Amino acid sequence: MEAVLTGLRAAAEATRLRLLALCAHGDLSVSDMVRILGISQPRVSRHLKVMCEAGLLERLPEGAWVFYRLAPTGPGAALARAIVGLLPAPNDTTATLALDRSRLEALRAERAEAAAAYFTTNAQRWDELRRLTGAEEPVEEAIVARLAGRPLHDVLDIGTGTGRLLERLAPLASQVTGLDQSRAMLALARANLDRAGVRNASVRQGDLYALPFPDASFDAVTLHQVLHYVETPARALAEAARVLRPGGRLIIADLAPHDREDLRERHNHLRLGFPTAEISQGVLGAGLCPGEVVDLPGPELSVRLWVADRP
């Protein structure tokens, strides 16, 4: 009962209700909310601090920035959603909420424009890689097929990039989370998820060697075209295994062994694909059970899928 009272007290202020309503639509930074609400940064930060302490919001550091969203779990999570559900829909009779929503949509449109510019700048790079491995859809479909039908509450995509795989995983789970080191890629992923209307996804900045999650946090973890950029793949696999729950599944999609040395310089590949023996050794060392291996040939390079489960 005390947790409910604390949450109600924390939300019992007009500006805080506006902030809760905004955070229900996805991850927002302090500067985003300052811009939308038109009030000072210290006031916004103070309100957010109170609601985080009450468990209504979750705080997500990202370098020098901090993003906020409705708490996905914990005693305040259900209360936060219940409070938001009681707020009137934005319309002419709720001018303040309607204006907030309009400003949020304008902000999202700017994000989408910036993301499109980033993608255009890097389009040649994406197109070249796509010519080597072929279309992304068969790989994504193979990943989804090996997770469909499993009891999935939380799913993590490490090295999420543009967030494309998160869109495919979102219908399978209650909550999907993407992790990437690049703020530019996270901005692109947020814009793509907003445009696709995905509401059960969030992205976070972090290091795949030190995932910012407790042990046994996820029912499934994916590593899609990530390991060939990694100095010590076995260490990355061990960290991915750490956050898997008992019975959870790890899916690795990466390049099969090849001899394209030019990719080291042109695309910063550290590894020229992986033999199955190396991946199997890595997942065994991480305490997982190696499972199915699937080859997906491309025009020049083959993608290989490795499945491993935590006992």
Image (cartoon, helix red, strand yellow):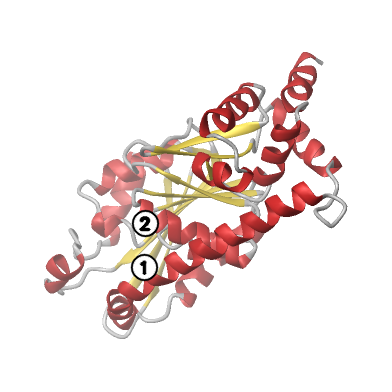
The structure residue drawn at horizontal position 51% and vertical position 63%, both measured from the top left corner, is: 110
Which amino acid type is shown beneath numbered disc 1?
Tyr
- What amino acid type is highlighted by mark number 2? Ala
Residue 245 image offset from top left, x and y in percent: 54, 38
Question: Could you tell me which residue is drawn at 78 percent across and 14 percent down?
Answer: 2
Measured from the top left, where is residue 243 in percent x and y?
47, 37
Tell me which numbered mark, 2 or 1, is placed earlier along the sequence: 1
Asked if 120 appears above or below 5 in the picture, the reply is below
**From what the image shows, is residue 3 above or below residue 274?**
above
Q: Residue furthest top?
A: 2
Task: Check disc 1 and report the residue beneath it.
Answer: 118
Near mark 1 (Cα within 10 A), the count class, few <14, some 14-19 or many ≥20, is: some
Write down the residue under mark 2.
184
Is 211 in front, or is 23? 23
Q: Return the x and y of residue 145 as percentages of the image width and height.
A: 57, 66
Q: Are marks 2 and 1 in contact (CB under 8 Å)?
A: yes
278 left or right, relative to 92? left
